[in-house]
Amino acid sequence: MQENLPKRRQRGISAERELVRKLWKLGFAVVRGPASGAKIRRSVYPDVVAIKNRHIFVIEVKKRSKLDHIYIDRTQIEKLKEFARRAEGEAVIAVKVAELRSWKIIPLDIIMNNTVEVSSEKIRIDKEMIKNAEDLIEYLRKRINVSLDAYTSKSSIHIKDGYDDV
């Protein structure tokens, strides 16, 4: 099924699945949006939703091989904001930069206050903002106020759908 998609889209799906597996191993209940990123204009759902201890994270996933600016459609941002509002969750952009070997998290409110509008339809997240963003695990630890170490060293649940291989 995935072999018919463009390589760029395949990499995006791969990054989303990687993040889902990582969050699952950290003890989150996680779901990846069906057909996330597809050209479904009326849908209002994010790439990933992660929940732990009543904290809801609404996530748009981006992947880059090298640290560089990211351009996001304004409508994508508005949909993320709307979903987070309805879920009473926190909207974030998760960026996997292979060059940095880490996941970076940028809250949407920081993005909206510090981005460059390149057109009426797109905004730019500067590479410095991405570079200086918090690491995924550190960000989540601060928000949840619990140790995720118990989940990083072992997982008591083994499932056969591919989420246990990160």
Image (cartoon, rainbow, N blue to C red):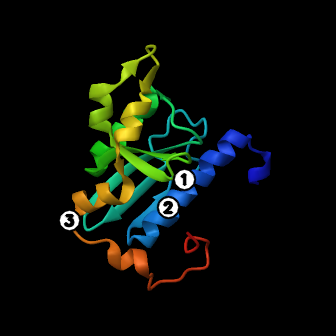
Residue at 74% over, 40% down:
6
Quadrant of the frame with the C terminus: bottom right
What percent of the width, then of the height, locates residue 56?
31, 57
Q: Which of marks 1 and 3 is in front?
A: 3
Under mark 2, the amino acid is Val
Mark 3 element type: loop
Under mark 3, the amino acid is Asn
Mark 2 element type: helix
- Count up the numbered dots: 3
Residue at 56% over, 70% down:
163
Cα separation, mark 2 vs mark 3, equals: 21 Å
Q: Which callout, 1 or 3, points at the residue further toward the start of the chain?
A: 1
The answer to which of 164 and 139 lies nearer the viewer is 139
Cα separation, mark 2 vs mark 1, equals: 6 Å
Report the side of 148 relative to 166 (left or right): left
Mark 1 element type: helix
The answer to which of 11 and 101 lies nearer the viewer is 101
Under mark 1, the amino acid is Glu
The answer to which of 5 and 147 lies nearer the viewer is 147
Instruction: Name the residue beneath numbered marker 3.
Output: 145
Cα separation, mark 1 vs mark 3, equals: 25 Å
Q: Which callout, 2 or 3, points at the residue further toward the start of the chain?
A: 2
Tell me, for residue 20, which label it has, or none: 2
- Asked if the residues shown at circle 1 and circle 3 are in contact, with their CB atoms under 8 angstroms apart, the answer is no
- Asked if the residues shown at circle 2 and circle 1 are in contact, with their CB atoms under 8 angstroms apart, the answer is yes
Report the side of 163 relative to 141 (left or right): right
What percent of the width, then of the height, locates residue 111?
33, 32
The extreme right residue here reads 4
Report the side of 20 relative to 115 (left or right): right
Report the side of 9 relative to 138 (left or right): right
Residue at 25% over, 50% down:
88
Tell me, for residue 16, which label it has, or none: 1
